[in-house]
Amino acid sequence: EKIKEEIQCFHMKTSNDLDIFRIKFLGKKKGIITILFKELKKISIQKRKIYGKIINELKKEAQNKIKIFHSKNEIQKNEKGLKFDPTIPGTSIEIGSRHPLSILKNRIIDLLTKIGFTYVDGAEIEDDWHNFTALNIPIFHPSREMQDTFFLCKNPDFLLRTHTSSVQIRYMKKHSPPFRVLSIGKVYRNETISSRSNFMFHQAEGFYIDKKVSFSDLKQTIHYLITSLFGKAKMRFRPSYFPFTEPSAEVDLYCNSEWIEIMGCGMIDPQVLKNVNIDSEIYSGFAFGLGIERLALIIYKIKDIRIYFDNDIRFLNQFKSEF
Ligand code: PHE
């Protein structure tokens, strides 16, 4: 029992400990177990059987301990084989940045939802009624002509929307006022690609319908949006014409000693309200539409509109934003 305990309690850490253990218990000349086996020859056959069994068990115990030591060592060796070094810095993952148009889109959504606008999405494929007719755009209006609009099919007419004003119609048909709505998305016009124009661009459309909405509400909303985006900006409302607003205006921004047109707006024409079954005697509203690309050119001092879609990583990497 004593020897058994000694075997069990022997602490082995290094291969040197293993050697000491082996010599101590199983050494060919002086090993404790070896000596016991030698002693066995000297005693009577009957006792030899009993003691032989005990000594054999001790031998097994010692051999087992050596086996366990080896298998543990094996695992350690394998771990070393992986060459895992926790002190080596990890490989960093490159994080992308948002596209400038997405940043501006998110900023506009953030600013306008703060003052009560609800964000909605609209379809890019429209029919003639939602894109033109309901918005008071008569058949002979130039924006209906083939050079401006991408028609998908004729009779019935389906087209790629030329502006986000179609969202006004879809929303007003489904909901009853009062409401403030914002929508941002792609619009398409058959235009020659240049540094200033593209056949596809993004528009933001805002509209508000309630009792007694006036032009001053429109001015205040635009003023809030523009000063939030540009700081103390010099802007002006210039009388203009849109078939679906009356009166209509264009908003210009003063930058680099010139006036730049940035959006169209106006009071929603009562006829448009009638087209979507809203009582124009009770309700009035305003609407505005602006080009995201155009606005981003000014904010980020970009000279060519085409760079937005070149996917040049050197350009895209420059935009880091919380949005
Ligand atoms: N839809 C007009 C355009 O595409 C912009 C606009 C929107 C004007 C809303 C007035 C009111 O140019």
Image (spheres, rainbow, N blue to C red):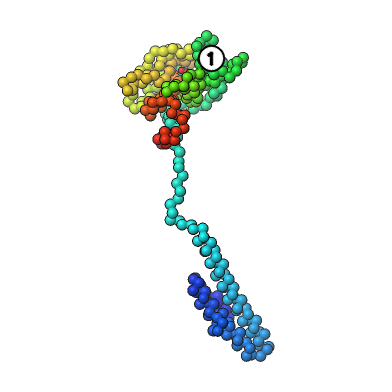
Residue 157, position in %: x, y? Answer: 59, 16
Position of residue 5 measured from the top left corner of the image (x, y, whole percent): 55, 78
Relative height, residue 246 to residue 296 (above, below): above
User: Which corner quadrant of the image does residue 2 belong to?
Assistant: bottom right
The residue type indicated by label 1 comes to Met
Q: Which residue is mark 1?
A: 146
Q: Residue at x 62, y 78 (%)?
A: 57
In the picture, measured across the screen, residue 261 lies left or right of residue 47, that is left
Q: Residue drawn at (44%, 29%), measured in percent from left and top?
A: 308
Q: Quadrant of the C terminus?
A: top left
In the rendered view, would you say 28 is above or below 193? Answer: below
Q: Position of residue 281 (x, y in %)?
A: 49, 12
Callout 1: few (<14), some (14-19), or many (20+) C-alpha neighbours within 10 Å? few
Q: Which one is in front, 322 or 59?
A: 59
Secondary structure beneath label 1: loop
Of 69 and 216, which appears nearest the observer? 69
Quarter of the image for residue 124 reads top right
Residue 152 horizontal side relative to residue 297, left or right: right
Closest to the observer, 54 or 119: 54
Does the rendering let one see residue 156?
A: yes
